[in-house]
Amino acid sequence: MPERRKSPRYPIFMRVYFPEHDTWGYTTNASLEGCFVVIRNSYSTGFITEMILDLPVIGPVLLKGYIHHKGKEPQGVGMQFVQVRFSKDESEYFKIYAKFIKSLGRLRDIKEEYIRLTQEGKIKLLVLPPPGNEQPFVA
């Protein structure tokens, strides 16, 4: 099936909060038009709601979206943003979100360069030990 999205979709974990329903979830991917949110609650397709996305490094932004489709594995919903229904502050939040999403393309390029350098043997691929083995850091 050919890709119908207008902008690239990036794999990214972001915490999501739906304040109207006091429900938490997280994204598995995001694009300029929307995101997929893993949640336990079931919502109807077409349902419009506010959502707070916690953008890494940036912080939380408030957006409005509607449920475009339901996911089966993992359980969740495909959200599409509805800019025409944004309030003034939501429009400003969306501008920040758009800048963030557009920056992910550059980060993907940097990751590809990192992988290429490891494959060429110019640097080693580093792996951190699992959490819990940290030693206290003393400055």
Image (tube, grey):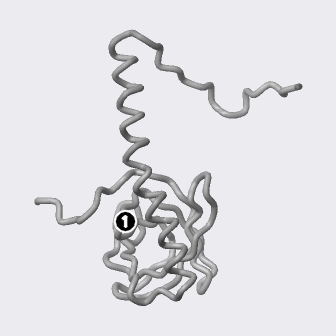
- What percent of the width, then of the height, locates residue 101? 43, 58
Instruction: Tell me the quarter of the image containing the C terminus.
Output: top right
**Mark 1 residue element:** loop
Q: Decide if residue 14 is on the left or right side of residue 32.
A: right
Q: Residue at x 60, y 25 (%)?
A: 128
- Outermost residue on the left side: it is 1
Q: Decide if residue 81 is on the left or right side of residue 49.
A: left
The number of callouts visible is 1
Q: Is residue 116 above or below residue 65?
A: above
Q: Residues within 10 Å of mark 1 (few under 14, many from 20)?
A: many
Say which of 139 and 11 sits in front: 139
- What percent of the width, then of the height, locates residue 74? 40, 61
Q: Residue at x 43, y 80 (%)?
A: 65
Q: Residue at x 38, y 69 (%)?
A: 34
Q: Is residue 25 above or below residue 91?
A: above
Amino acid tagged 1: Leu
Location of mark 1 (residue): 32
Say which of 33 and 74 sits in front: 33
Q: Residue at x 61, y 52 (%)?
A: 57
- What percent of the width, then of the height, locates residue 123? 46, 13
- What percent of the width, then of the height, locates residue 30? 40, 60
Asked which quadrant contains residue 1, the reply is bottom left
Q: Decide if residue 70 is on the left or right side of residue 135.
A: left
- Outermost residue on the top side: it is 121
Asked which quadrant contains residue 28, the reply is bottom left
Q: Decide if residue 47 is on the left or right side of residue 3.
A: right
